[in-house]
Image: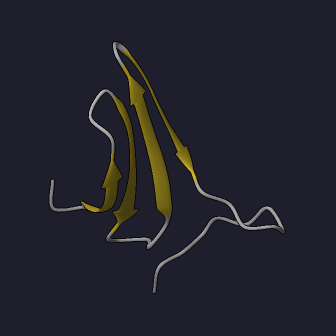
Amino acid sequence: MDRFEKVYSQGIIDVIEIWVDTETGVNYMFHRNGNAAGLTPLIDKDGNPVVTQ
C-alpha cells in the first residue's frame, strides 16, 4: 500500500475515494456502493489524467 495514498473519502455505504499513485502522480476515483465497485483515472477537460505533483 506504499504506492497509493488515499487523499479524499466520503460516505459509508455509498463510498467515493480519491487515490493518488505516488510514483506517477495520477489521481484515481474509487466508487463503492454495497457489493459493486469501480476504479477510474480522473481526467481534466482536455482528456488528460489529473496529476498531483
Image-quadrant location for residue 44: bottom right
Which one is in front, 3 or 11?
11
Position in image of residue 14 (x %, y %): 39, 30
Which of 10 and 40 lies nearest the eye of the viewer? 10
Q: Residue at x 68, y 60 (%)?
A: 43
- In the displayed orientation, state which residue is furthest to the left: 1
**Residue 31 appears in which quarter of the rendering?**
top left
Q: Is residue 37 above or below residue 53?
A: above
Name which residue lies at 54% across and 75% down: 51
Q: Is residue 2 left or right of residue 35?
A: left
- Give coordinates of residue 15: x percent, y percent: 36, 37
Q: Nearer the viewer, residue 53 or 16?
A: 16
Q: How many marks?
A: 0
> Residue 35, image x and y in percent?
34, 12
Where 9 falls versus 37 (above or below)? below
Residue at x-position 31% and y-position 27% = 13
Residue sitting farthest toward the bottom? 53
Task: Tell whether 22 sits left or right of 45.
Answer: left
Q: Nearer the viewer, residue 8 or 12?
A: 12
| Residue at the outermost right position | 46
x then y, percent, for residue 12: 26, 34
Write the residue at 32% across / 53% down.
Answer: 9
